[in-house]
Image (cartoon, rainbow, N blue to C red):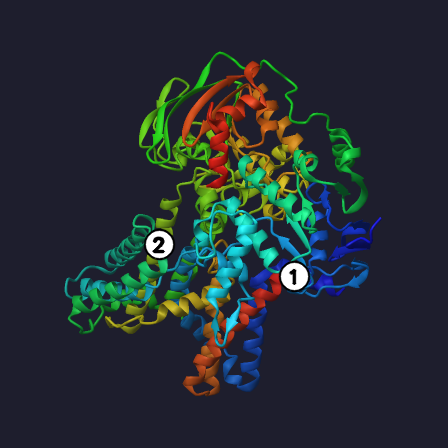
Amino acid sequence: MKTNAMQLINKLGREFGIVIALFVIVAIFSAIDSQYFTVANLVDIIDQSTINGLLAIGITFVIITAGIDLSVGSILAIVVVLIGKLLTNMGVDPITATLAGIVLGFLLGIFNGFLVTRLKLQPFIATLGTMSVYRGIAYIITGGWPVLNMPQAFRDMLDGDFFAIFRLSILILFVFAILAYILMRYTRFGNYVYAIGSNEEATRLSGVNVDYHKLMTYGLCGIGAALAGMVMLARLGTGEPAAGQGYELNAIAAAAIGGTSLAGGKGTIIGTLLGALLLSALKVGLVVVGVDAFWQYIATGGIIVAAAYFEVIQTRLRG
Amino acid sequence: MEKPVIEFKNIGKSFSGNAVLEGISFSIQPGEIHAIMGENGAGKSTLLNILHGIYTPTAGEVFLAGERTAFSSIQDAIEKGIFKVHQEVSVIPALTVGQNITLGYEPQKGLFVDYARLNEETDAILQRLKCHFRSTDKASKLSTGEMQMLAIAKALFHKAQVISFDEPTAALSDNEVNAFFDVVRELKASGITIIYVTHRLNEIFQIVDRVSILRDGRYIGTYKVADITREQLIKSMVGRDVAAFAVRQHQGLVQAETVLEVRNLAREGVFSPVSFQLHKGELLGFAGLVGAKRTDVMRVLFGADKKTSGEIFVKGRKAEIKSPVDALRQGIGLIPENRKTQGMVRMLTNADNVGLASIKKFCRLGFVNHAQKQKNCETFIEQINLSPRDPLYITENLSGGNQQKVVIAKWLSTDADILIFDEPTKGVDVGAKAEIYRLMEELLAKGKSIIMVSSEMMEIIGMSDRVLVMREGSLEAELSREELTEERVLHFAMGGEDSFENECNAAHK
């Protein structure tokens, strides 16, 4: 009976574990403060996870290939200031600006991929470098000043009300997540990405164009960062060159909590999405309950370590 | 009879309810070379791991020199004089030879390692083993054979009374094997007991005194090597007759059509220009010692490494093969030498691994039809006789022979016409070997062509229609089936008239 229960947990996998953890967190905070379990607050939790969720989904592609992208926060910053300039100084219409943002993020990601696949740099070092370079570019573009007064049309398009309940940015997150899920689960591209992360050499020797697929994961990661940047721009109405500093670590945390292995070959989009929600539920909960902000760091760290340990136990059960 | 140095009494071991070993009882005499044989999955490694304290048996007892023992860890076993030389010798490349040998037991002088003593002690051992490297050499510079010697030196450093070897010759060239045998004989002469796990039948008859056979986790029997024939040995291992398994059942499948022509293909600094042709239905063997660069030729041919010159023609047409992607397009497949790092993708299922190179077959607009992929795998499971017959099984968890079959199926699924098998039966058990040979013949009969790189003489002689012999990066000879003898192949592999001298040099390298 006990082994059956274990097998069931194994079969349902990581995602199920996070869902349970999510319920536990919601239950605990709701018990402490009934304010927590209100529609408005639950919507807020999802809202708060949008930006990190977009970044995390993007980075999941890269991490599954056994790579990493530390520059996502800086890509976000370039997109924020450059698209901000397009919208304000140059008066570009919101749709064109958004598309330009996506292309920009993609190209910045592709440059990371170029460093990794062509120059054969280690992903950690390559993107540590571009993290700094991209950040510098963001500052240079604005001379250090924020870009102010985003047009209302742009703000409404990306982050306006959606049936008076949700904000539109949630839709962006879920559409991106669904596309990413389909890509990883049902396409040749996804198959190859998992294979590359699990054994790059064997995949190459199977006649798969490994470099191309790795390059594309960095491009997709850049798109995730660009979307996150534009949601942020729409939400705040201003674009700061300092935006997104340190966000790469939250994104990695969400992916890791969701079961993505930094060693590559393992991870799911749903897991990452749940990981981002979990972090957000925790953060919102601590605020609602009124815990000192400093404690949030400890709680976030604790969750990451606990999730990693859960992984170890699961592997042991299987062995 | 003397009192046995090791006695297994009714040993059993289960993993989560599955019995891997059951009722194993036999004993090992002091100073003998005792082989443990059986197919992959017979339980040899599990039994060794129990002896070395890596696993605790779920039933039965181990006696060491008459005393009941239960080692709690491998360190515990080492301190009692039982040492294991691992299947894939683990050497830390960044350390020196001496640091490797003494790792964890370095002689100390106060707070510091006493390097003078460390090097003196290890050099003495290396001298005894007639090694040509010294304690202060970096371990990263050692060849595979030398790493093996390092492991033996480590055993002697720990004053081991019993040394076990798990597939010690799998990665060694013939010269290195001979040097290794000399050392093993000397260890025996100095009273050390040797336990020897191997798949290679020849070795049993060369150096082993007695052999114990396991099959499906059960003990079959212990035989004096002098009293048993090769066929009897195979029969008791597989429980059926595998008469002469590396022998062609069908000859004359070779057709006139040339499917592959290689002209002056070279990679500077690795191998000098090679030219050869491959015909439809032909099995072309590539013989040579380890280090003859046969694998490098295949990797260049397959586009995995860059060529510096030469041309490749596939079915009469010039083929630009710059990457494995191009090779795949030309209908060339490679079953690489190292299954674990180059052949299979660890975390994937059989269906994914089999479909990896041919995924386009079951894709529409980039979307994978998983049901079709699974069905594709099932047809090949049938053809390659995979066990278990489950497309959703994780390939990594299969036995070595079955993993190899999956890698082969990956290329069958692409319908490649030219298949390169690099050491196709390395680390594969007897039963699976026979099946791989049978599969190769089936492919030839279907008009496929095969290049087989192999260091196993039996395989080269038994299976090839024609053999090319390489030595130190150059093509030395072409032998037709009629000209093929073990002596001839060795003659060219070692380098013509002065072969004996070369052999000595190679052994010293």
Disc number lying in front (1 or 2) = 1
Res B290 visible: no
Q: Is residue B21 left or right of residue B137?
A: right
Identify the element where label 2 is drawn.
helix
Residue B8 to residue B420: above or below = below
Residue B78's disc number:
1
Q: Which residue does the image show at 56% across and 69% down from the upper left?
A: A309
What percent of the width, then of the height, locates residue A59?
40, 60
Which residue type carries mark 2? Tyr
Closer to us: B347 or A61:
B347
Q: Amino acid at mark 1?
A: Ile
Image position, residue A153 (x, y; %): 26, 65
Q: Chain of mark 2?
A: A
Tag 1 secondary structure? helix
Q: Label 1 neighbourhood size at 10 Å, few (<14), some (14-19), many (20+)?
A: many
Residues at circles 1 and 2 in contact by the CB criterion of under 8 Å: no
Q: Quadrant of residue A162?
A: bottom left
Q: Residue B193 vs residue A122: left or right?
A: right
Question: In terms of depth relative to the viewer, which is nearer, B504 or B483?
Answer: B504
The residue at which mark 2 appears reads as: A218
Q: Quadrant of residue B65?
A: bottom right
Query: Alpha carbon of mark 1 to alpha carbon of mark 2: how far?
Result: 49 Å
- Same chain for mark 1 and mark 2? The answer is no
Q: Residue at x 53, y 44 (%)?
A: B145
